[in-house]
Image (cartoon, helix red, strand yellow):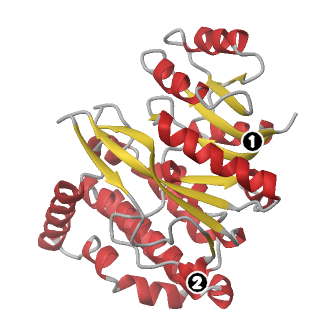
Amino acid sequence: MEKLITFAVPCYNSAAYMDHCIETLLQGGEDIEIILVDDGSTKDDTPAICDRYAEQYPDIVRVIHQPNGGHGEGVNQGIRNASGIYYKVVDSDDWLDVDALHKVLDKLRQFVRDGKLVDLMIANYVYEHVEDNTQRVMSYRNVFPVGRVFGWKHIGRFKPSQYLLMHSVIYRAQILRDCGLELPKHTFYVDNIFVYEPLPLVKNIYYMDVDLYRYFIGRADQSVNESVMIGRVDQQLRVTYHMIDAIDLGEVAEKSKKLAKYMYNYLAMMMAISSIFLTMEGSPESLGKRTRLWEYLRTVSPRLYGRMRYFAVPAATNLPTAPGRRLSIALYRIARKIYKFN
């Protein structure tokens, strides 16, 4: 039976916090589907918790137990098995605001009743900072029209900290299938691919100004912790290379200059993140990887390289010489303190 929306929840040794996530999703009612993807958990009761929810809510919850494949393979399994018209990923340590969830689902039901499906719904997300118990809402009121369906030509200017993340998007599931989305296994940071790669197929969008997704951030072992990101910089590189190869931004620009500009800025951000963490790692090997990344971009698109190499943000993370590298790191940490993005 087709459901309104599938929520995919990749779970890996998540027993300590996954109940809160799932309980918020269950408030969506009978026409939602929750796919719990147990990603080879062995250290706690995650598999048993998944099975318990499937037994308790057989018309809503499905469980997939898979050998460990990483977060991306959990998302892939959700897409392959989803019966929902729409698809959203919710990480097992995050949760949804229940009041906002009801508003979003009501609007999606209206689209289905009217036979006018949108390709992408966007809602706000909230950083829940564990280290100082503060919140920061990421909204898009300055970027998107509120309360009406629109296309890329109607979007405004994104602020530097305001990119779309997996937390803010709900894709029509067929869009994900039509673009052939397949996230790399055993790789962190694939949420960037999830958001970026389907965008050229999106024709109509709806933005709902509600604070839906609660993004729990600040745990020491979290993938966006600075020291963890330095240790996983090769995975960040893998994602950036994938994004360079996935989309020809010149072709996108022929159809929508505004979308191409947004995607260019997104890719520039990824180049900057890869560059700064290779710089922080600091070994000759890492600095060589940084050079090869930029040279690869040059071989794929000399024009894109020429624009991006001197674009303020990525250029500031790729300064030559030891003093330049120290300045790059200092600028990054100032931005991190201001924007609190990890």
- The residue labelled by disc 2 is 153
Crowding at dot 1, Cα within 10 Å, few <14 / some 14-19 / many 20+, comes out as some
SS assignment at label 1: strand
311 vs 102, left or right, is left
175 vs 333, left or right, is right
Front-most of residues 281 and 59: 59
Residue 54 versus residue 281 in the image, above or below = above
> What x and y, as percent, mark residue 117?
76, 60
In the displayed image of the protein, which residue is found farthest to the right?
A: 1
Alpha carbon distance from label 1 to label 2: 28 Å
Residue 34 versus residue 199 in the image, above or below = above
Residue at (58, 83) in percent of width and height: 153
SS assignment at label 2: helix
Residue 243 versus residue 220 in the image, above or below = below
Q: Quadrant of residue 326?
A: bottom left
Q: Earlier in the sequence, mark 1 or mark 2?
A: 1
> What x and y, as percent, mark residue 327?
14, 69
Whether residue 299 can be seen here: no
Q: Which mark is residue 4?
A: 1
Residue at (83, 59) in percent of width and height: 115
> What x and y, as percent, mark residue 187?
54, 44
Question: Identity of the amino acid at label 2?
Answer: Lys
Figure quadrant of the N terminus: top right
Residue 32 versus residue 54 in the image, above or below = below
Residue at (67, 11) in percent of width and height: 51
Residue at (57, 70) in percent of width and height: 244
291 vs 202, left or right, is left
